[in-house]
């Protein structure tokens, strides 16, 4: 059975550390992914607040962005449906925060660990 090579988005463990320009491009790509996730999440939260709580778009933006930022809702919610939505959205927002932090930290941690490994192999 032939061995398949696994090619991912990062250079292999035994490969050279990528250039600074390539690293910055990789980091900007990760930041773009996080911006897209946060943007879609913010829009979904705003739509939920507008439809379920009857908020204006500005108030919906404020509540959704506060939850995504980890601060919590700002205004009173008028009905049970909006309160259930806010609770589910708050749990979702916490996951978005954790995932976003992981996506941003991953290329930095990979570069640090790869450099340490490359230095070890140079000896």
Image (tube, rainbow, N blue to C red):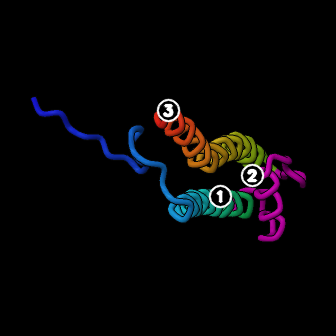
Residue 66 magenta-drawn? Answer: yes
Compare residues 21 and 77 and report the one nearer the observer: 21
> Is label 2 in a helix, a strand or a loop?
helix
- Residue beneath the point at 54% across and 58% down: 23
Mark 1 or mark 2, earlier in chain? 1
Residue at the far top: name it: 1
Judged left or right of residue 65, residue 98 is: left
Region of the chain picked out in magenta, as a range = 51-78
Of badges 3 and 1, nearer the viewer stands 3
Tell me where residue 20 appears, x and y as whole percent.
Answer: 56, 60
Residue at the far right: name it: 75
For the residues bearing labels 3 and 1, Cβ distance under 8 angstroms: no
- Which numbered marker is on residue 123? 3
- Residue beneath the point at 54% across and 38% down: 119
Q: Mark 2 highlights which residue?
A: 68
Tell me where residue 13 appears, x and y as whole percent.
Answer: 42, 38
Residue at the far front: name it: 123
For the residues bearing labels 1 and 2, Cβ distance under 8 angstroms: yes
- Residue beneath the point at 63% across and 50% down: 104
- Residue beneath the point at 58% across and 58% down: 27
> Is label 1 in a helix, a strand or a loop?
helix
- Which numbered marker is on residue 38? 1
């Amino acid at each position: 059975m032939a061995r398949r090579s696994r090619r991912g988005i990062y250079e292999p463990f035994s490969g050279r550390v990528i250039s600074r320009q390539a690293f910055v491009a990789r980091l900007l790509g990760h930041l773009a992914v996080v911006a897209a996730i946060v943007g879609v999440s913010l829009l979904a939260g705003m739509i939920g607040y507008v439809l379920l709580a009857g908020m204006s778009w500005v108030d919906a933006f404020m509540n959704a962005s506060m939850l995504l930022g980890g601060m919590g809702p700002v205004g009173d919610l008028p009905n049970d449906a909006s309160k259930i939505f806010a609770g589910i959205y708050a749990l979702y927002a916490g996951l978005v925060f954790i995932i976003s932090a992981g996506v941003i930290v991953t290329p930095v941690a990979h570069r640090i660990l790869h450099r340490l490994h490359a230095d070890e192999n140079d000896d």
